[in-house]
Image (cartoon, rainbow, N blue to C red):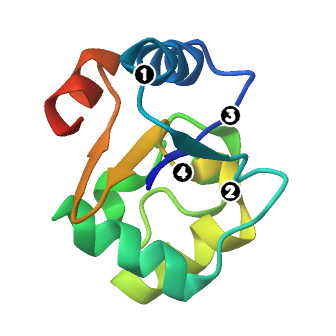
Amino acid sequence: MIRIYHNPRCRKSREGLEILEASGHSFNIVKYLDEPLTEDQLQQIITLLGIKPIELVRKNEAIWKSDYKGKQLSDKAIISAMVKHPKLIERPIVINGHKAVIGRPPSLISEIL
């Protein structure tokens, strides 16, 4: 089953959702701001994406700039920050089986459908 980790207030996330709707595939929507991820779930997503935790952080968010920017943080600390402040998680994230992509640009989503 395809999953999209979605923030309805984000234009790129809405564009990603439109791509999934147009694809004809069935999928689940996870509104991660309403249904916070656990550290284990976030680690699994990061592993599927094949990236380092810092690559999933929205570094322009005010909370990142005020509380974390410029600090030496372990991967575990970065994941904990994203769990505590889900707004820090880049979006949308789409997972299809063992493949995952950050939909920036949203057209990347088509590559894993």
Q: Nearer the viewer, mark 2 or mark 1?
A: 1
What whole-number distance in Å separates the C-alpha atoms at marks 3 and 4? 10 Å
Residue 72 in view (yes/no) = no
**Residues packed near mark 3 inside 10 Å, few (<14), some (14 to 19) or many (20 plus):** many
**98 horizontally vs 56: left or right:** left
Mark 2 vs mark 1: which is more N-terminal? 1
- Residues under numbered marks 4 and 2 in contact, where contact means CB atoms less than 8 Å apart: yes
Q: What residue would you read off at disc 1?
A: 24
Mark 4 vs 1: CB contact within 8 A: no
Quadrant where the C terminus is found in the figure: top left
The disc placed on residue 7 is 3
Q: Which image quadrant for residue 43? A: bottom left
Dividing the picture into quadrants, the one containing residue 14 is top right
Q: Residues within 10 Å of mark 2 (few under 14, many from 20)?
A: some
Instruction: Give how far across and how far down residue 49 sits, in percent.
Output: 23, 59
Give the x, y percent position of residue 6.
Answer: 62, 38
Q: Quadrant of the N terminus?
A: bottom left
